[in-house]
Image (spheres, grey):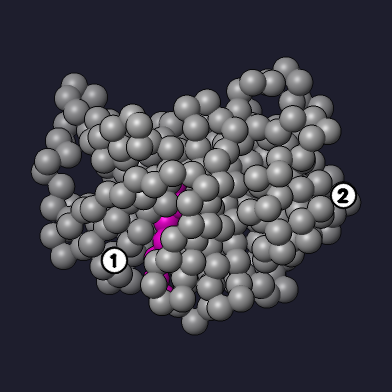
Amino acid sequence: MGMNVTFWGVRGSIATPSPDHMKYGGNTSCVEVNVNNRVIILDAGTGVRLLGECLMRRNQKDYLFLQSHTHWDHINGFPFFCPIYRDDVNIKVMAGHLSELGGIKKVLSSQMCQPTFPVPFSELAANLSFEDFKSGDSFSLGDGIHVRTAPMKHPDGGTGYRIECEGQSVCYITDTEHVIGHPDQDILELIEGADLVIYDSTYTDEEYPQFKGWGHSTWQEGVRLCKAANVGQLAIFHHDPAHDDEFMDQVAKDAFKAWPNAFVAREGMSMEVGAETYPDKVSLAR
């Protein structure tokens, strides 16, 4: 029972299968939120492959994907998510930024077209359904699970999510860019009082000026937002491919000094939402 979060991919932009990225992980964005045994998957980056294998071992048959957006690093694991090839599995995919561009089904199927992928989308065996909404909408998933959304400032658009159930809440705020000195009011409203916020921390404040306009934020901005919104914990997420383990170790130290409730997300990290789960108390997913 309760809400549990597992990080299956924490890297941004492109996977980094390098010896210098082993500690924090090289797979791209994929986070599992387990709410009273309901599986919600936030993004289908390369980390979703390992999640799919784990779900099959658990004999889990029903999943919901909530897509932040559909740049490659957030969807290119979908064709390798083994449950989509099982006819006894039910999968629903939702997105909030594609209603005027043909919808989420069109985007996911297009990346599985020849000559770029050998298995056509039409060959998938799972019971797949797709739903497009508008960023800013709220909806219920049943079983007391409620989802609120907000638009993100990112090229081609994006959606931030707040998942709530029985007084617990986790927010997924990735691939969004801030304006220096002007906190994003949409984000502040969405994350207010949340137990855990997973935030786009691609850059540091020192790096940000050279990447202005690329659609990403910093861990320092994440700290500022979370402190202003009375958030319980901040997960520093969507690590830049150029940031190796040594760099991320320093980010972890600096972030802890800035705000002890901030920690760097690592691939395989699993934590109970709302509990006293700091980096030295997490368990790694099996």
Which one is nearer the viewer's eye here, 125 or 232? 232
- The spot of residue 90 in percent (x, y) is 23, 62
Which one is nearer the viewer's eye here, 192 or 93? 192
Q: To which quarter of the image does residue 215 belong? A: top right
Check disc 1 and give the amino acid type.
Answer: Asp
Q: Residue at x 76, y 48 (%)?
A: 225
| Secondary structure at numbered mark 2 | helix
> As drawn, is 279 to the left or to the right of 237?
right
Q: Which residues are magenta?
A: 37-45
Q: Residue at x 64, y 67 (%)?
A: 282
Check disc 2 and give the amino acid type.
Answer: Ala
Above or below, 189 relative to 3? above
Cα distance, mark 2 to mark 1? Answer: 40 Å
- The spot of residue 172 in percent (x, y) is 57, 52
Circle 2 crowding by C-alpha within 10 Å: few under 14, some 14–19, many from 20: few
Q: Mark 2 or mark 1, which is nearer to you? A: 1
- The spot of residue 237 in percent (x, y) is 62, 45
> As drawn, is 200 to the left or to the right of 106?
right
Above or below, 41 relative to 214? below
| Secondary structure at numbered mark 1 | strand
Reply yes or no: does residue 135 show up in magenta. no
Q: To which quarter of the image does residue 52 belong? A: bottom left
* Residue 92 appears in the figure: yes
Which one is nearer the viewer's eye here, 229 or 134? 134
Mark toward the start of the polypeptide (2 vs 1): 1
* Residue 253 appears in the figure: no
Circle 1 crowding by C-alpha within 10 Å: few under 14, some 14–19, many from 20: some
Q: Please give the residue where the numbered disc 2 appears in the rendered image.
A: 258
Which label sits on residue 62?
A: 1
- The spot of residue 184 in percent (x, y) is 71, 40
